[in-house]
Image (cartoon, helix red, strand yellow):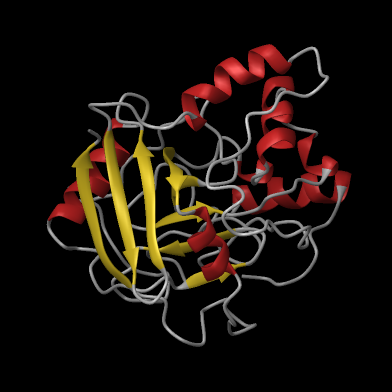
Amino acid sequence: MLNQKFLKKKAFTLFLTFMLALNLAGCGTKSAPGGQDTTDTNSSKAPEATEEVTPDTQDTPSSEATDSPASKEVKEQASIQTKKPVKGDTVVTISFKDYGDVKIKMFPKEAPKAVENFTTHAKKGYYDGLTMHRVIADFMIQGGDPSGDGTGGESIWGSEFENETVEYLNPIRGSLCMANAGPDTNGSQFFITQASKVDESYLESVTDIQKEMYRQFGGCPWLTGGYTVFGQVYEGMDVVDTISKVKTDTSNDMPLEDVIIEKIKVSTFE
C-alpha cells in the first residue's frame, strides 16, 4: 500500500527478500497483491508510474517481436498466455458498474485449483456487489474481499490453498492473479495487472525468456513466481486502465468512490 518509489537494484532485491520472509501481503501499495487475514494487505512495492497506455490500443499485449535472439522462443511461450481464446475455452466476464466489461481467458490446465475456486465463487454470486478495494495506477487493481478492506475472504474449500505457478505464465500486463499473504495462502482475493512498461532494474532476478516477455508486454516482474497467474485479459484492458486511474486514499490505495463488481459471468467460448 505504500505509495513511494521502490528501491532499485540491490536495495530492491534485499527489500523484496525481507518482505517475502515476513509473508507477502499481496497487491497493495505499488507492492505485491495482498491476501486475506492480514492487517496490511500489501508487501513488495512496484515501480513508479511510467508511460500511460492509450485506452483501446492494447486490449491484449502486443506480440510484436523484438531484435533479441530469444524473440522466437518468447513468442512461442507468450502465445500460450496472450493468444485469444478458442472454441471450448473457459472465459469469464467481469462487469464493473459504471465502467464496463473485462473479458478473461482462464488457464484450468496450469492452475486448476485457482480456476475452480474463482469460477465456482463467481457462479454462486460470491463476488457480486464487492468492491475493488485496492487500486494503484501502473501496477494493478485488486478485489474479491467481502470485508472490503483486504483482510477477508476465503476459498470455496474454506481453507487456504497452494500457489500454482509455471514459468510460461507470468504477471505481464492484463494477467488475472490470486492475491495472497505469502506462499500457499490463496483464498478469494484476486488482482489484474495493469503496468504497461517495465523498469530494467526489476528484471535482474527473472529468466531471459521472462525478461523478454516483460519487455514486450509490460507487467510486474517483481511478482514473478510468488502469485498464481490463472487468467489473461483478452478484451477490456481499457476498462482496467480507466479503473486504475480513479482517485484513491493515499494511506491504503482504496478508491474514494466504490468501484463495484456487478457480476462475474462464467462461460465457454464459442
User: Could you tell me which residue is drawn at 46 percent across and 30 percent down?
Assistant: 165
The residue at the point 64 percent across, 45 percent down is: 219
- The correct choice, above or below, for 100 with respect to 234 in the image is below
Q: Residue 229 appears at what percent x and percent y? A: 45, 38
Residue 40 in view (yes/no): no
Q: Quadrant of the C terminus?
A: top left
Q: Is residue 194 at least partly visible in the picture?
A: yes
Locate residue 113, reporting x and y percent. 27, 36
Above/below status of 139 relative to 252: above
Q: On screen, 130 above or below 138? A: below
Name the spot of residue 122 as percent of width and height, x first: 21, 55
In this view, the residue in front, 94 or 132, is: 94
Instruction: Identify the residue at the far left of this view.
Output: 124
Q: Residue at x 61, y 50 (%)?
A: 57
Compared across the picture, whether 248 is left or right of 106 comes to right
> Which image quarter is the N terminus in?
bottom right
What residue is shown at x 65% (from left), y 82% (from top)? 250
Q: Quadrant of residue 216?
A: top right
64 to the left or right of 263: right
Q: Is residue 185 left or right of residue 240?
A: left
* Most foreground residue, 146 or 37: 146
Residue 152 as seen in the image, left or right of residue 200: left
